[in-house]
Image (cartoon, grey):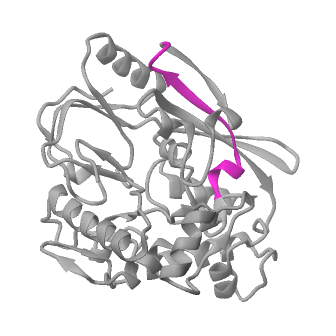
């Protein structure tokens, strides 16, 4: 484990490039180190922030008045001889590197999650998903340290409480420190059935068809890059936290109200009788187009859902001001409340 440092500026550790200093900062390069440093801080009553890839995080300009523990645990174990293969990755593994390895080794089930920034440990927390796949479809267990009980153990997928961009980890934030994640994948040269219309169109196939894994990965990365969703130092639109708002899920009464305000708006009916509405459509039709600026921050020029820090000079307060303007504008026009997708530390929308 690296030395404990003081006053480390946190902005460079986030994809948004915002965030003030940490009172204390340490990197944990193994499960025992990670558990030990968090447990010690808890015993001493010191606030703890566990930091992964910083791709789904908005940190206050005031920084963090406590200990920031950066997860650097590495290692991947692949087992299984038949069609079903188990992949266990340590929390500090780069997510996209893991996906690339799975594709290269003919393991299907995560190929549509290519190009997503961040570390493995964050994937179950957010139930990371894109283009018709999410990690809840493949996660079997999550190895965690429970800060409430002081014990280390495995949570089953059911115990993780997965839902759309949600999990039990988000319901009780900070309680569990993710140490490793195990995924059940299929040994196959072909992707899982393509489940997303935009991806199917790019691949030139019908929904439900399967394509070579590398083709699926390449198409997803191409789509994401076109939206500024693949990290690139030369592209200021990628200085973001990805999609800033989740797609609202409305009950029948809320859906009826929106239909009165915006007849014929795009929507998807869900199996549980709810209605999902694209947040990007709501934002754009509330008067916030791509490239909409507010001081040093702006909506991405490529994707309405992403709020960006193009010059890297903006603060978290600047970003929050734009997020609130967009949220309030959508609520006023459509009566729908947008909810932030990134985790906020030291601030709230």
* Residue 67 is one of the magenta-drawn residues: no
| Picture quarter with the C terminus | bottom left
In this view of the protein, which residue sits in the foreground, 109 or 99? 109
Query: Residue 89: image x %, image y %?
Result: 58, 40
Residue 29 lies in quadrant: top left
On screen, residue 159 versus residue 255, left or right, reads: right
In this view of the protein, which residue sits in the foreground, 23 or 171? 171
The structure residue drawn at horizontal position 72% and vertical position 89%, both measured from the top left corner, is 204
In this view of the protein, which residue sits in the foreground, 33 or 118? 118
On screen, residue 174 versus residue 251, left or right, reads: left
The structure residue drawn at horizontal position 78% and vertical position 84%, both measured from the top left corner, is 206
Residue 263 lies in quadrant: bottom right
The residues colored magenta run: 134-149
On screen, residue 283 versus residue 181, left or right, reads: left
Q: Is residue 249 shown above or below 54?
A: below
Residue 238 appears in the figure: no
Query: Residue 211: image x %, image y %?
Result: 77, 76
Query: Residue 331: image x %, image y %?
Result: 37, 68
Q: Is residue 232 shown above or below 83?
A: below
On screen, residue 25 versus residue 81, left or right, reads: left
Q: Is residue 170 shown above or below 107?
A: above
Query: Residue 62: image x %, image y %?
Result: 12, 43
């Amino acid at each position: 484990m690296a030395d404990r440092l003081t006053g480390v500026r946190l902005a460079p550790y986030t994809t948004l490039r915002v965030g003030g200093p940490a009172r204390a900062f340490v990197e944990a390069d193994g499960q025992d180190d990670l558990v030990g440093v968090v447990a010690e801080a808890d015993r001493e009553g010191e606030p703890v922030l566990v930091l992964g890839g910083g791709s789904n995080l908005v940190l206050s300009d005031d920084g963090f008045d406590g200990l920031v523990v950066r997860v650097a645990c590495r290692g991947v174990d692949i087992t299984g001889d038949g069609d079903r293969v188990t992949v266990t990755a340590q929390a500090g593994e780069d997510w996209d590197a893991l996906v690339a390895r799975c594709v290269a080794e003919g393991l299907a089930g995560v190929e549509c999650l290519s190009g997503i920034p961040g570390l493995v440990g964050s994937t179950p927390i957010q139930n990371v998903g894109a283009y018709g796949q999410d990690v809840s479809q493949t996660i079997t267990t999550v190895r965690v340290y429970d800060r409430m009980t002081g014990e280390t153990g495995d949570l089953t997928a059911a115990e993780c409480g997965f839902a759309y961009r949600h999990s039990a980890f988000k319901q009780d934030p900070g309680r569990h420190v993710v140490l490793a994640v195990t995924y059940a994948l299929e040994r196959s040269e072909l992707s899982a059935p393509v489940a997303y219309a935009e991806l199917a169109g790019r691949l030139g196939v019908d929904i439900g068809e399967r394509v070579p894994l590398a083709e699926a990965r390449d198409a997803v990365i191409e789509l994401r890059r076109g939206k500024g969703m693949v990290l690139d130092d030369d592209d200021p639109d990628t200085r973001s936290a990805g999609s800033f708002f989740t797609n609202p899920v409305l009950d029948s009464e809320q859906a009826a109200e929106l239909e009165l305000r915006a007849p014929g708006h795009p929507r998807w009916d869900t199996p549980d009788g709810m209605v999902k509405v694209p947040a990007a459509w709501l934002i754009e039709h509330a008067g916030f187009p791509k490239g909409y600026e507010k001081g040093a921050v702006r909506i991405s020029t490529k994707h309405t859902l992403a709020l960006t820090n193009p010059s890297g000079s903006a603060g978290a307060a600047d970003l929050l001001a734009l997020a609130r303007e967009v949220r309030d504008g959508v609520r006023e026009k459509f009566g729908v409340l947008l909810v932030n997708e990134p985790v906020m530390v030291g601030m709230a929308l």
